[in-house]
Amino acid sequence: MASIPGIGAISATALAALVPNPQGFASARHFAASLGLTPKPHSSGGRERLDRISQQRHSMLRRLLVLGATNRLRYARRSPDAADWATRRLARRPFKVAAVALANKMARIAWALLARGGTYTTAGTA
């Protein structure tokens, strides 16, 4: 898991230790929601509105993922030639919003690796 960009040794260890049963979550979105990285929905009348992130449990994991995403976005700012998902998101959204969105994506990738096994490759994740 430490091979995922933005997740280091400490974050990977914390994820492995604090999430003993990743199959307990129905999907990667449920896992990210349990970390408090998904926006609260306030929908009515067919109009979907998304509020701030829920910040439920596992504040330490959420903090580690957002910190890793922040560092990855800072690196993306310095090298604008790397046109990946993070730099495109950063061009459209404020820095903190892009950092939480990237942390959400990193949590979903981590869940997939925990639940299904395997190793992380960069092909197809841009």
Image (cartoon, rainbow, N blue to C red):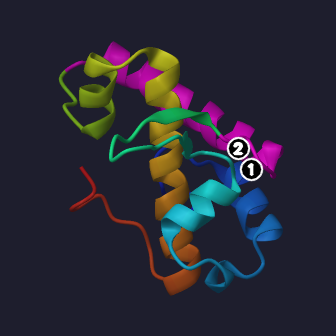
Tag on residue 88? none
Q: Is residue 10 found left or right of 82 in the rendered image?
A: right
The residue at the point 37 percent across, 44 percent down is: 45
Q: Position of residue 110 (x, y in %)?
A: 54, 64
Tag on residue 10? 1
Vertical placement of 10 versus 99: above or below? below
Quick one: label 1, few (<14), some, or many (20+) residues within 10 Å? few
For the N terminus, the image quarter is: bottom right
In this view, the residue in front, 25 or 106, is 25
- What's the residue type where badge 1 is placed? Ile
The residue at the point 58 percent across, 48 percent down is: 7
In this view, the residue in front, 94 or 56, is 56
First along the sequence among labels 1 and 2: 1
Residue 66 painted magenta:
yes
> Is disc 2 placed on a helix, strand or loop?
helix
Quick one: label 2, few (<14), some, or many (20+) residues within 10 Å? many
Q: Is residue 111 visible?
A: yes
Q: Position of residue 38 (x, y in %)?
A: 55, 46
The residue at the point 35 percent across, 16 percent down is: 77
Vertical placement of 119 versus 18: above or below? below
Q: CA distance from mark 1 to mark 2?
A: 13 Å
Residue 74 painted magenta:
yes
Magenta part of the chain:
54-80
Q: Quadrant of residue 86?
A: top left
Vertical placement of 21 versus 126: above or below? below
In this view, the residue in front, 42 or 84, is 42
